Image: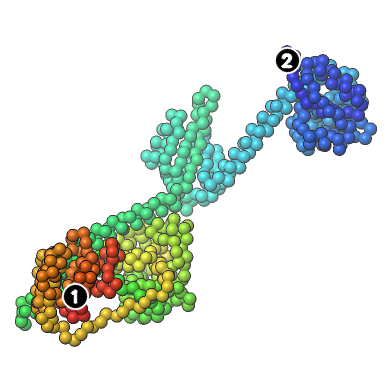
Amino acid sequence: MTEARHIDLLMVEDTEDDADLLVRQLEKAGYEITSDRVDNAAALEAALRRRAWDVIVSDYNMPTFTGVDALGLVRVRDHDTPFIFVSGTMGEETAVAALRAGAQDYFIKGKTARLPAAIERELKEAQTRRARRVAEEKVRQLSRAVEQSANFVTITDADGVIEYVNPGFANAIGYGAADLVGRRPFFRKLNTEADRELWATTRSGLDWHGEFENVRKDGSLLSVSATVSPVADDQGQITHIIAIEEDVTRRREIEAQLRQAQKMEAVGNLTGGMAHDFNNLLAVVIGNLDILVGQLGSGEPRELAQEALDAAINGADLTKRLLAFARRQPLQPQEIDLPELLSSTVKLIGRLIGKGYEIELQPVADAWPIVVDPSQFAASITNLATNARDAMPGGGRLAIAVANRVLDTGYVQEHPEAKVGEYVEIAVSDSGTGMPPEIVQRIFEPFFTTKETGKGSGLGLAMVYGFVSQSGGHVTVESEPGKGTTFRLFLPRAAMSAPLATSRSDGPEDLDGRGRTVLVVEDVALLRRVVVRQVRELGYKAIEAESIGAALAIMEQQAVDILFTDVIVGEGATGFDLARVVRQRWPSIRVGFTSGFPQAKLNAGSGPPPDARVLIKPYRKEDLARALADL
C-alpha cells in the first residue's frame, strides 16, 4: 500500500494474544489501527453503541459466546459493516453457513496472509453497499411521494404508451391503473393545439408547460396544468416522457365565477348609470304629461295624452328594475318577522301560480333576525316562484326552506362575491326541467331570458340578484337538466334589532301650497322647468336654481319656505351638503330631496341628514304634492 490507511477494528476474541497478532499483521500490511476487543454479548453491544466500526473480525468458537451470536447482534444494527470470521476450528460447511448468515469472509488462524487484501476489498464493497442503500432509500421516498402526491404523474415510453400512472391520477379520472398501463392516453382530449405542441416540444428534447383537459370515465372534463419532460439515455435518445399535472378544474371554476361577478358589476354600473339618465328623461316626460292630462278636457286628446303617460310610467318601472339589478334602488330596510312574511308570501304565490303545484314552506323556528326591505324581499321570493312555475309546465313541487348559515373563508374562496359571516339562507327549489351550465352562468344577467319572445323581460332574476347584493348578501343557483333548480339567498344576520321602518304617511288632506315659496334646485334644465311648473300648479310660489351656489345666493336675498333639491347637482358637493348649510344658517327652511338613484349616494361622502326624505325620480305630480305638503 502506498500510504497508510486508518481503520477502526473491533475484534470479537477471547484470546488477547490472538487479537494482538491480528493487529500486528494488519499494521505490517500498512494499516493504522484503532482497535478494541470484546468476548461476550454485553461487551459487543456496548462497543456497537459506542461508535461505528470499519471492520469486525470475530473468532467462531469461544467458551461462552459464538461468532454466529456475534454476527446476529451486529446485523440487527448494521447491514453493511464487513464481518469476517477468523477461527482455528471452522470447517467448510460451517463457513458456508456463516457466509449465508451475513458474514463477508472467513479465514483459518495461521492462514491469514490474504486478510489485509480481503479487508481492503470488503471496505470498498461496504462503501458501495451503503451508497446503494442510500440510493434505494431515496428511490423508496420518491416512490412514496409520487404514489401519495396530490399532483398527477404519468410516465410513458418515447411513443406515448403509458407505463405508469400514480393512484391520484387514476382515481381522479375514474380508471384503474391497469386500464391505463400499456395504452396511449385515450383519456386526454387529443388533436388539440396544446396536444400537438406538447408532442412536438418533448420530441425535440425540451420541456413543455401548459394546460390541457383530460376526459374522465364519466365524460366530464378534468383541467390540468402540466409540465411534460422527455427523459434521454446516455446517447441522447428519448426513452420516456414524464408528465406532472396539477388539477386546476376548481381553480378554473372559481376564476370563471370571479369573471362573472366582475362582469355583473360592470353591467350593473352601466345599466345603473343609464337608468339614472333615463329616469331624468322620463321625469320630464311624465311631469309634462301629468300637467297636460290635467289641462285637457275629455275626448281623444286627453286619451292620447293618458296613453302616453301610462307608457312613460311603464318605462319608469323598467328603469326601477334596472336600478334594482345595479343595486341602486331605494330600499326601506327593517327587521322583519321572517316566518310571517314568508307565510303571507307563500299564500300569494299559491294564488299566483295556480293549481297543479305543491308548495312546501320549511321555516326554522330559531331563524336569526335579518334587516331587509320587506316588499322587495317578498317580490324576490315571488319572482323565483314564478320562474319555478315556468320550469314546471306540467305541475310540480316548489319548496322554500330557511336555515341559519355561517359562511367561512373556505366558502368565500369558492364564491368570491360572498363575505365571511352569519347569514340566513332562504332556499327556493323546484322539481322542474333544470338548466345546463351555460344557462346557469348567465341567469342573473339583465335581459337574458330563456322564455319565448314576449313572455319575459329578462329582468326578474336580475332584480333578485340586485336586491340581495344591495342588502349585503349574495345569491347562488344550482341546477342540472332534468333535476330541477335551487336558488339560495344568503341575507346577513342583523347585528341588533333595527328600528321598524316608519310607514309612509298619507300626509295632510289639504295639498294646496297656500302661497308658500319653494326653491327648486336642479341642474337639468328641462327637468327643472317641469318641476317649477308642477310646483306652481300646486299653489306654491316657485323659484329655480341650477346650482348650489345659485341657491345660496337666492336664499341670501329672499325668504324661502321649502328647499327642494336634487341629491346630485353636479358641482362635486351634493344636495345633502347644501341642506346642512341651510339648516345651520336658516333653520326654519324645510328641506326635501329628489334623486334618480339615491341609494348610490346615501352613504357616500358625508351622507344624508338623519331625517332625509327622498322623492324618487320619476314621480307623479301627486307624489310631489304629498312630499311638499309633508314638509
Residue displayed at 8% across by 76% down: 292
Q: Which mark is residue 3?
A: 2
Quadrant in which residue 384 is drawn: bottom left
Q: Which mark is residue 173?
A: none
| Residue 222 horizontal side relative to residue 86, left or right | left
| Residue 572 horizontal side relative to residue 49, left or right | left
**Residue 406, image x and y in percent?**
47, 65
Task: Please tell me which residue lies in front, 302 or 466.
Answer: 466
The image quadrant where one finds the N terminus is: top right
The image quadrant where one finds the C terminus is: bottom left
Choose mark 1 or mark 2, whichever is in front: 1
Q: Is residue 25 visible?
A: yes
Q: Which mark is residue 589?
A: 1
Q: Is residue 579 visible?
A: no
Query: What's the distance in space between the residues labelled 1 and 2, CA to CA?
Result: 112 Å
Tag 1: amino acid: Ile
Residue displayed at 80% across by 24% down: 34
The image's colouring method is rainbow
Q: Residue furthest bottom?
A: 509
Quadrant in which residue 190 is drawn: top left
Classify mark 2: helix, strand or loop: loop
Tag 2: amino acid: Glu
Residue displayed at 44% across by 36% down: 208
297 to 449, vertically: above or below: below
**Residue 400, image x and y in percent?**
41, 73
Task: Please tell me which residue lies in front, 75 or 486.
Answer: 75
Residue displayed at 31% across by 58% down: 264
Quadrant in which residue 505 is drawn: bottom left
